[in-house]
Image: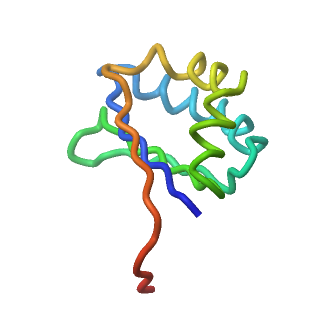
């Protein structure tokens, strides 16, 4: 499993629009090849900063399959207008599991 972590800075005052856009886009992730879950978290200290966590079976499911699909364009249409800066995206794999 590969975890995509996208740090997203939203334009001040656009937080509700962004959250609504992510909610609207959930079905896009649900039907994406290799996607097994999506979670959005908001920073307490910086309320215009979010982290989107998406679980993928493989890196290519995100970077090739999803990004190359019409659903990726639909995702960007749902939320892109709220971005203050381009999202910072990285992919991680679990190496130690505690609880």
In the foreground, 21 or 3: 3
> Measuring 69% from the left and 37% from the top, which residue is drawn there?
65
Q: Considering the image in quadrants, where does the N terminus appear?
A: bottom right
> Measuring 57% from the left and 33% from the top, which residue is drawn there?
22
Q: How is the model colour-coded? A: rainbow
Residue furthest bottom as drawn: 99
Coordinates of residue 28 in the picture (x, y in percent): 72, 35
Q: Considering the image in quadrants, where does the C terminus appear?
A: bottom left
In the foreground, 4 or 23: 4
> Measuring 32% from the left and 20% from the top, which residue is drawn there?
84
Coordinates of residue 27 in the picture (x, y in percent): 74, 38
In the rendered image, the vertical position of residue 52 relative to residue 22, given as above or below: below
Tally of numbered tags: 0
Coordinates of residue 77 in the picture (x, y in percent): 59, 16
Coordinates of residue 81 in the picture (x, y in percent): 46, 13
Residue furthest left as drawn: 45
> Measuring 56% from the left and 21% from the top, which residue is drawn there?
76
């Amino acid at each position: 499993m590969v975890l995509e972590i996208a740090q997203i800075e939203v334009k001040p005052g656009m937080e509700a629009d962004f959250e609504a856009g992510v909610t609207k886009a959930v079905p896009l992730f649900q039907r994406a090849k290799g996607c097994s879950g999506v979670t959005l978290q908001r920073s307490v200290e910086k309320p215009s900063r979010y982290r989107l966590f998406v679980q993928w079976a493989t890196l290519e499911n995100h970077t090739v399959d999803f990004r190359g699909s019409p659903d990726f364009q639909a995702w960007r249409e749902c939320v892109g207008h709220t971005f203050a800066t381009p999202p910072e995206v990285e992919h991680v794999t679990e190496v130690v599991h505690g609880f």
